[in-house]
Each structure stands twice: as structure tokens, then as C-alpha cells.
Image (cartoon, rainbow, N blue to C red):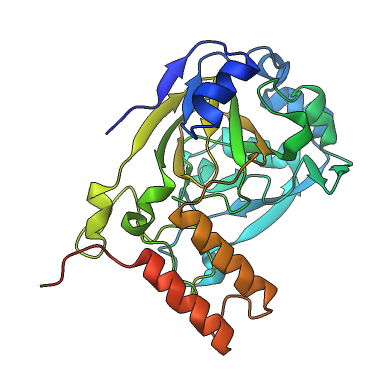
Amino acid sequence: MPEVERVGPLGRSDFEARFERPERPVVITGGARDLRACERWSPEYLSERFGSVVIPYKLSRTHLHPDFHAETLGQMFARESAPLSQFLKAITSGPLTERARRLFTGDERFLLRRRNGQTTIDAELGGLLDDAAVPELVPQERLFTIWGWFSGPGARTWLHYDNNYCHNLNAQITGKKRCSLFPPSELRQLYPFPLGGGNPAHNCSQVDCEAPDLGKFPGFERAERWDAELEAGDLLFIPALWFHTFVHEGEFNSNVNFWWKPLEPRYSPVWARQALLDAVAASGTDGKQTSPHAALLGALDAALTASTEPSV
């Protein structure tokens, strides 16, 4: 089980040659320490500046986000909203089990989005970018999205890949996290929720990494896994379409994700599968096999994700 390499500060050209182009994850120790957010972001500071902003956030029955053990899709993907100051209080005080149930991510509200040459910045939370300038390792001309994350101790993001085809530079601002990453070549060993099935989270694994059912998902035990730990001020490079899961361990965890498009998308089983899913969405079937076109895509999806277990 390889560890993600840890390196010191890198220049843009060195980073591109050693990690971005080969699509190899890396932790850059202290790579985010120059961001003012690393000095400023605390629940008190954020509450003073943005506390009245009402934010939507994920609300799980447990510490898992999403909690795919829940009985209904509504429970799996439940959200609530509250002023940021109230949310921050909920994740930094009280029983640990309660603190882990809430998670704010860019799924709910992006900080910056750039599409077709047009840049949109959140009118109320965009001020966070004053403290989190885009690192020089990120090519500005290919910047796609910037997200913020806030969480308490114990929260875990379920194993998934980001379906935007983007590289991700994850800046750990406060707190710490443990993460596991799996390359796109391991798709068959990670058992994503199938196209046309009851769960629309097609970019998520069916496997609970904390308690994997190896009888049901035997290939998971053989999947190539890369592990890393992030401390405040570290940067983690997650190459496009790599599966990943994070355990949030700090008393107050905050992160900023900088996404950008690769110069040349690299073919992989995940790339092919996501292209199929996008084609289904474009066909208007919304992932449901209600037409011959969607049924064909479903069959191709099944072929991409078929178990490699030998027949008995």
C-alpha cells in the first residue's frame, strides 16, 4: 500500500513535470502556509466576517457523508441551512457524534466558478478568497472552480471521484485529515453505484471503507490504495478522476479546493464511464434506462465495472 509522496515547496514547472502530467498524487508540506487563511481562519474570525450568511450544508444521520446505509435517498442526501455562525458553533461544540453530522462543501455553495471565460464569485462568501489566493501551482487560464469546506472532528466523506474531469489542489487551512486515494485504473475493484440503479450517486463506491463487505465486494481488498495525512498548511494534489475518501480529524477543519482542467484528458475506465454517464444525462433520461440508447449505455457501464472475479 503506497504512501503519497511528501515533498517541500515546488515551482510550477517542477510540479507539472513530476506530478501533474504523470497524474501522480503528492503532498506539498507547508505548501499553503503563505495563504492568509492559515493565519486568520478560526470559527471566531469567520463568524465575525460571514456569520450572518445563511448557508446550506449536509446533515447526515451519522458521521458519513453521504451515509449510504440510510434507508432512503432523502436521508442519504439530507441538507439543512443556517447562518454560518450557527453552523460553526454546531461543528465546534457539543458531543463529537453531533459535530460530525454536519458538513459544508462547495456542493452547497461554490466560492468561484469559471465557465466559457466568464467568472462568477459568490456575492456573500466570495470574500473568503481574499484570504485564499490561487496558488501559483494552479494554471490560472484553466481554473474551473474554487470550493470551501468546513467540518468538525470525525466526519468522513464517502469514497468517490469528482465528476468534473478536473485536477484538484486541496489546501488544508486548519485542522487535519487522513485520506485514501485510488487510481482510475482500479474502477472495477471499487464497485461504483451502477447506471440505471436506484442510487443516482454514480461517482460513489458502494463500499464502506470503514467496514468493507469483502463477501459482496471481494476485489476491494486488492485495490491499489495510496494513503496520506494532511496537517494545517499542507497541499494535496488529487489527479483528475482519482477516487478518494477523507477522515476529518481536527477540532475545526477548513479546506479550500482549487480545480482546473488537464491540458490533455487521459483515457481511463473512469473517464470512459463518466463520458457514458454524461451522454445519458444529455439524452434526457437522467440515468434511467428508459430508452434503447440509455439501455445500451447501461450495458457498456456494466462492462466497464464488471467484477474481475474468476467464475467458479
Residue sitting at x 71%, y 29%: 139
Which of 147/241 is in front?
241
Which of 251/269 is in front?
269
Which of 176/183 is in front?
183
Residue sitting at x 20%, y 64%: 309
**Residue 300 on image: x %, y %:** 45, 73
Where the C terminus falls, by quadrant? bottom left
User: Does any portion of residue 166 appear in the rendered image?
Assistant: yes
Q: Is residue 216 left or right of residue 105?
A: left
Q: Does residue 82 sit above or below 312 in this rendering?
A: above
User: Does any portion of residue 197 appear in the rendered image?
Assistant: no
Say which quarter of the image contains residue 169: top right
Q: Is residue 90 left or right of residue 51?
A: left
Say which quarter of the image contains residue 233: top right
**Residue 29 on image: x %, y %:** 51, 15
Which of 39/118 is in front?
118
**Residue 98 on image: x %, y %:** 51, 45
Q: Is residue 195 left or right of residue 260?
A: left
Residue sitting at x 15%, y 71%: 311
Q: Does residue 139 sit above or below 57 in this rendering?
A: above
Q: Does residue 123 sit above or below 201 in this rendering?
A: above
Q: Is residue 218 left or right of residue 136?
A: left
Where the N terminus falls, by quadrant? top left
- In the orientation shown, which residue stands out farthest toward the bottom? 291
Q: Does residue 29 sit above or below 301 in this rendering?
A: above
Say which quarter of the image contains residue 207: bottom left
